[in-house]
Image: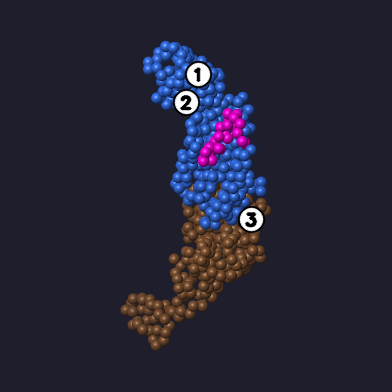
Amino acid sequence: MIQVKNLNFSYKKGVPVLKDIDFSIEKGEIFGFLGPNGSGKSTTQKILTGLLKDYSGEVKIAGKEIRKQGIDIYKDIGVLFELPYLYTSLSAVDNLEYFGSFYPKEQLRDINEVLELVDLKKEYRRKPIKKYSKGMRQRASFARVLMSNPNILFLDEPISGLDPSGAILFKNIIREEQAKGKTIFITTHNMYVADELCDRIAFIIDGDIKALDTPKNLKNSEDHGFVDIEYELNGIIENVTLHTKEILNGFPFTYDKIKSIHTKELSMEDVFVKVTGRGLK
Amino acid sequence: MLKQFALLLKKDIKLIIRHNFFLIMLASLLFYSLYINFIYVNEGTKTTATVYVLYESSRESLISKDENIVIVEDEEKLIKALEMDNEGIGIRLDNSGKPSSVLLYHVSKKSDNFKALYGLSKIIDDYDDSEIPISYLQEGDLELKQRATMTSVIIFFEIAAISFLGVASLFFKEKSMGVIKVYGILPASKLLYILSKVVLFLSLEIVFAVLMCLFNIGVEYSLEILPQIILQVLLLSPIMVLLGFLFALVYNNFKQFIFAYTVIIVMVTSPVFLFVTSSLEWTGVYALPTYYAYSALYNTMLKNPYPILYYSLACILVILGLIITNYNLMKREIERG
C-alpha cells in the first residue's frame, strides 16, 4: 500500500532531516514509526500525506507517486493529529458535518455511529468543543478521521491525552480498523503503544531507520542474557537482576531459599536504547 | 467545486456570526450615519475654513499675517477662490471697513451662521452677530458634497480597516484552533478557502457601502452612483482582505499583526483622507497606493472624472498577485504545522 525508497529530505540545504529511508507497508498492516522528538517522524508523515513535496526518492501510495496526486488522494487518507484540531466554537456534530461534507456521501459513516464508537458522551455532542476536556476533544478528533472511512490512517500519538479506558478503547478501534483491511501508520514515542499495536516497527533516529522488524523479533534480536532472581534471606524476600554468566558457578549472594528465576524480558524502550544508543525522550 | 465553495463560505459566515462581526458592522453603520447626519454636516468644518476678504473700495493687494485669512484683489478672484475651496468663507468689506456681505456655499442654516460668524470674528474684533448678511453661491450643493465626502471616507476606512482586521482575526482564530492543518489533508481546494473569505467580506462591504450611501447621501443621488461605487468596492475590498490575510499568514500571532495594522491604518491610510478632500498639498502622498485607491472612491462619489480603466487594471493585477502569494503562503503554513 505504501512504498518508500531512498527518501531524502531537508528543510535547509546541507542539513538532511531524512537520510535514504526505505520501507514499505502492506495493506492491512499496522506500521509503527518509533523515535524521539526531532528524529524525523513528523516529516516522514508529512511527506506520506503529501504535505511536503520537495523530497528526493520515491514515495508511492497505492502504486502512485504521492507528489503527483491531486487533492482526491485525501478521500483515501485520514490523519489524526497529535492535538485535536477542531472548530472550538462548533459542536462535535457540527465539526463532523462540516469536515464530512468535503467527502463523497457514499463514503461517509454515520456521525452518531462514529461518535458512539469513540464513546463521546451524548450530552456533549451538540455542545461547543471549547467545553470539552482534552480526552473528549481527542475522541471527537478521532471521530473526524473515522467518519470519512479512509483506507489509510495516519495516526500521530493516537492515545495522547486519553485516560486508561480511552486508551484501551482507541487501541481496540485501531485493531478493528485493521481487521477491515485498513492500512495504519502510527508515529509515536510511546513504546507500549508501538509494542502492543504494531505488526512492524521502525526505529528512527536523526532521520535514519536504525531497525525495522516485528516487535517480537526486535526484542529477541537483542541477546542480553539477564535473569531476575527472587530469594529469601532471614525471612525477608529480596530481588536481584544478574547476568547468566554471573550465576554459572552458583549464586553470588547469601540466601536461605531461591523462590524464582525468570529470564528478564526487554521492553521496547530497552531494545530501542540498545539499537540506537539513544533514549526515546 | 461550487459545493466546496458554498461549504467554506457557510462555515465562514457561521464563524463571523459567532464572533459578533455582524454586530460590529451594524454598530459602525449606525454610528457613522448618526455622525454624518447630526454632527458632521452641521459642525464639521466650523474651525478650519479659510476666510477670503475683498476690500470693495481698494484695488490694491493687501497682506494678512493670519494664514487663515486671504486677501483677494477683486470680485472675480473672490468667486474663483470659493469655487476652488467650497468650504471657504468670502467676506466683502465696504468703504468703512464694515462687512457688506458674507459669501458661502449653503450647508445648513446653523452651520452657515456659525461659519459666517467665525469668518467675521476673524477680521472684526467685536462683531455684533445680530445681523449676518449671508449670500449663497449655489444653494444645497455643499451639504451634498460634504455628505458624499464623509461617506466616501467612512466606506474607505471600513474597507481598509475593518475588512483588513476582520479577515485577520478570523484567520488567527482558525490558526489558533489548528484547523488550518486539517485543511492540508482534506479533499478541499486551498484556493477556495482563501476565496470564500474574500467573497464573504466583499459581500459585507457591498451591503455596508450601499446602506451608507442610501442613509447619508439620499436615494436619488445614491441610485446615480451606486453601480460605480459597487465597482470601487469590488476592486478595493479584495485587496484589503487579501492583504489582511497575507499579514495574518506572515505573523505568528495577533500582537505582531496589530503592529502591521497600525502602520497601514495610521500611517498609510489616514493621511490620505486629508490630502484628497482638501486643498492641502504634500507631494509625499503620491507615493501612497492608498491615495489612488481613495481618490478613485472619492471621485466616484462626487461624480468627478478619473482614469477608471487604468485604475481597474492595476487593482485586478494586484488582486491576482495577492491571491498567488497568499496561496503559496498558506501552503507553507500548512507544511510548517
Callout 2 crowding tier (Cα within 10 Å): few <14, some 14–19, many ≥20 = some
What colour is chain A? brown
B304 drawn magenta: yes
Determine whether the residue tagged by mark 1 lies in a helix, strand or loop. loop
Q: Amino acid at mark 2?
A: Gly
Identity of the residue drawn at 39% across and 86% down: A250
Residue B80, placed above or below residue A182? above
Q: Which mark is residue A71?
A: 3
B158 drawn magenta: no
Determine whether the residue tagged by mark 3 lies in a helix, strand or loop. helix
Mark 1 or mark 2: whose residue is earlier in sequence: 2
> What's the magenta region?
B286-308
What colour is chain B? blue
Contact, mark 3 vs mark 1 (Cβ under 8 Å): no
Residue A238, placed above or below residue B184? below
Residue A73, placed above or below residue A223? above
User: To which chain does the residue with label 2 belong?
Assistant: B
User: To which chain does the residue with label 3 belong?
Assistant: A
Residue in front for this viewpoint, A221 or B19: B19
Residue picked out by circle 2: B44
Residue A203 visible to an observer of this rendering: yes
User: To which chain does the residue with label 1 belong?
Assistant: B
Residue picked out by circle 1: B74
- Name the residue at the right extreme: A106
Do the residues at pointers 3 and 2 share their chain? no
Do the residues at pointers 1 and 2 share their chain? yes
Q: Amino acid at mark 3?
A: Ile
Most prominent secondary structure in the magenta stretch?
helix
**Residue B190 screen position, x and y as percent:** 60, 51
In the image: residue B39, left or right of residue A184: left
